[in-house]
Image (spheres, rainbow, N blue to C red):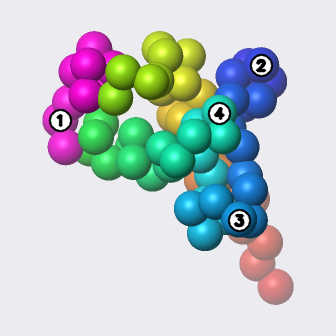
């Protein structure tokens, strides 16, 4: 799984420092938005031919890890 996460890059000088796929100007949020719009993986890959199937998995894994964090109550 850590190999998948290595596909996610963050560069403060690119896309406002938002997480992107393999240094391209395709943000993780762009991929998630396409899934949310109802496209399946095959359709996303057709829409964005620079992406690979593992990029889509990486975007989902990244989002899952970011959302699954402990909340501390004081």
Q: Which residue is mark 3?
A: 13
Q: Which residue is mark 1?
A: 38
> Which of disc 3 and disc 4 is earlier in sequence?
3
Please provide percent x and percent y for residue 8. 68, 38
The quadrant of the picture occupied by the N terminus is: top right
Query: How busy is the neighbourhood of tag 4: few (under 14 within 10 Å), some, or many (20 plus)?
Result: some
Query: How busy is the neighbourhood of tag 3: few (under 14 within 10 Å), some, or many (20 plus)?
Result: few
**Residue 14 in the figure: left or right of residue 30:** right
Q: How many marks?
A: 4
Q: CA distance from mark 4 to mark 2?
A: 12 Å
Q: CA distance from mark 3 to mark 1?
A: 31 Å
Query: How busy is the neighbourhood of tag 1: few (under 14 within 10 Å), some, or many (20 plus)?
Result: few
Please provide percent x and percent y for residue 57. 53, 23
Q: CA distance from mark 2 to mark 3?
A: 24 Å
Dots 1 and 4: beta carbons under 8 Å?
no
Residue furthest toward the left?
Answer: 38
- Residue occupying the point 64% across, 60% down: 14
Magenta residue span: 37-47
Camera-side mark, 3 or 1 = 3
Please provide percent x and percent y for residue 45. 33, 20
Camera-side mark, 2 or 3 = 3
> Which of disc 4 and disc 1 is earlier in sequence?
4
**Residue 2 in the figure: left or right of residue 43:** right
Q: Which residue is mark 2?
A: 3
Quarter of the image for residue 21 reads: top right
Dots 2 and 1: beta carbons under 8 Å?
no
32 is higher (above) or lower (below) than 7: below
Residue 30 appears in view: yes
Q: Which mark is residue 53?
A: none
């Amino acid at each position: 799984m850590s190999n998948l996460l290595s596909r996610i890059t963050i560069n403060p000088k690119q896309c406002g420092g938002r997480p992107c796929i393999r240094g391209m100007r395709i943000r993780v949020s762009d991929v998630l938005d396409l899934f949310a719009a109802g496209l399946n993986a095959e359709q996303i890959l057709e829409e964005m031919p620079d992406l690979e199937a593992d990029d889509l998995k990486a975007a989902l894994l990244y989002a899952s890890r970011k959302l699954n964090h402990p909340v501390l109550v004081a």
